[in-house]
Structure formats: structure tokens, C-alpha cells
Image (cartoon, grey):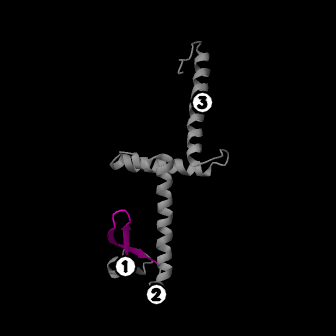
């Protein structure tokens, strides 16, 4: 199988298949799934390959959990290009929140603070703009 991929992936050394078993304790249901991975690691050290795969899924699961909890990504009903575009935007928003060193608190709190800050800035700008043209700003409250 590795020969099938050799010309396509530079540095490919192994194709690894891992079978995992999942038990749903509430129902006792047992499912088995085999996943295949291509890797630049040598298959002579299966522990190293297994650690790399675990690390990959740890990062993937943490990112997905953070996107879902903070930005409710799983509730999104977007499809095709809209889904890809929205996913890119949510990842940028999450990175911005993670890199923010000013706001203190959880990611959810940072997200809420950012929303309040945007609304406050919008209201201030509207007040300035309407005062420049001698009109009353609309009452939003």
C-alpha cells in the first residue's frame, strides 16, 4: 500500500492502520473502527507513531472543542463554501481571542467583552457622526 502513495507524498515512510474499539457504557454497545495514516515516521518504532497520532488527535479535539464551546460552531447550519469560509473566520476569531493579553477571563468572557466593545464603539461613532450633521442619533435602548 505504501508504494501507492510514494510518488505523491515527499518523505513518506509508512502507511499505518490503527483499529480502535469504543464501548458505550450506557448501552453496552461496542464499535470497532480502523483508521489509516500516512507518515514520515519509520514503522520500526510503533510507539513513536502511536504518540504522533495521539498528539494529532489531541490538538484536533482541543481545537474542535474550543470552537464549539466558544463560538458554537456545531450549531452552524452553513454548507459548502459558506461552511468553509465561516470555519476560517471562526478559527481567526479564536486565534485573536487566544492572543488577547488585555482582557482577562475565559474565552467565552473574552468573546462577550469583544462584542460589547464593538457595540460601544458603534454607538460612540454614531453619536459623533450624528452630532456632526446636527441630528439626534436614534435611540437604540
Nearer the observer: mark 3 or 1; the answer is 3
Q: Quadrant of the N terminus?
A: bottom left
User: For mark 1, does the 10 Å Cα neighbourhood hold few (<14), some (14 to 19), or many (20 or more) residues?
Assistant: few
129 displayed left or right of 12: right
Q: Residue at x 49, y 74 (%)?
A: 52
* Secondary structure category for the residue under label 1: helix
Residues in magenta, as a range:
19-40
Q: Quadrant of residue 14?
A: bottom left
Q: Nearer the viewer, residue 135 or 106?
A: 106
| Residue topped by disc 3 | 120
**Whole-number angstrom distance, CA of label 3 to CA of label 1:** 56 Å
Q: Are marks 3 and 1 in contact (CB under 8 Å)?
A: no
Q: Residue at x 53, y 47 (%)?
A: 93
111 displayed left or right of 24: right
- Can you give x and y, in whole percent of width and height, for residue 104 in the image? 66, 46
**Whole-number angstrom distance, CA of label 3 to CA of label 2:** 59 Å
User: For mark 2, does the 10 Å Cα neighbourhood hold few (<14), some (14 to 19), or many (20 or more) residues?
Assistant: few
Who comes first in sequence, dot 3 or dot 2?
A: 2
| Residue topped by disc 1 | 6
Question: Main SS type for the magenta part?
Answer: strand
Q: Residue at x 55, y 45 (%)?
A: 108
Who comes first in sequence, dot 2 or dot 1?
A: 1
* Residue, far bottom: 44
Tell whether position 57 is magenta. no
Q: Is residue 63 above or below residue 76?
A: below
Which mark is on residue 44? 2
Q: Quadrant of residue 77?
A: top left
Q: Quadrant of residue 130?
A: top right
Tell whether position 27 is magenta. yes
Q: Quadrant of the C terminus?
A: top right
Amino acid at each position: 500500500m505504501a508504494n501507492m502513495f510514494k510518488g505523491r507524498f515527499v518523505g513518506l515512510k509508512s502507511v499505518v492502520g490503527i483499529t480502535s474499539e469504543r464501548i458505550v457504557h450506557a448501552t453496552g454497545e461496542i464499535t470497532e473502527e480502523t483508521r489509516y495514516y500516512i507518515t514520515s515516521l519509520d514503522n520500526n518504532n510503533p510507539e513513536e507513531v502511536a504518540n504522533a497520532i495521539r498528539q494529532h488527535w489531541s490538538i484536533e479535539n482541543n481545537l474542535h472543542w474550543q470552537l464549539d464551546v466558544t463560538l458554537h460552531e456545531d450549531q452552524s447550519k452553513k454548507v459548502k463554501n459558506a461552511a468553509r469560509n465561516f470555519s476560517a473566520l471562526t478559527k481567526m476569531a479564536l486565534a485573536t481571542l487566544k492572543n488577547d493579553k488585555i482582557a482577562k477571563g475565559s474565552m467565552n468572557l473574552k468573546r462577550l467583552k469583544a462584542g460589547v466593545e464593538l457595540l460601544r464603539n458603534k454607538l460612540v461613532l454614531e453619536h459623533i457622526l450624528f452630532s456632526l450633521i446636527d441630528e439626534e442619533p436614534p435611540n437604540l435602548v
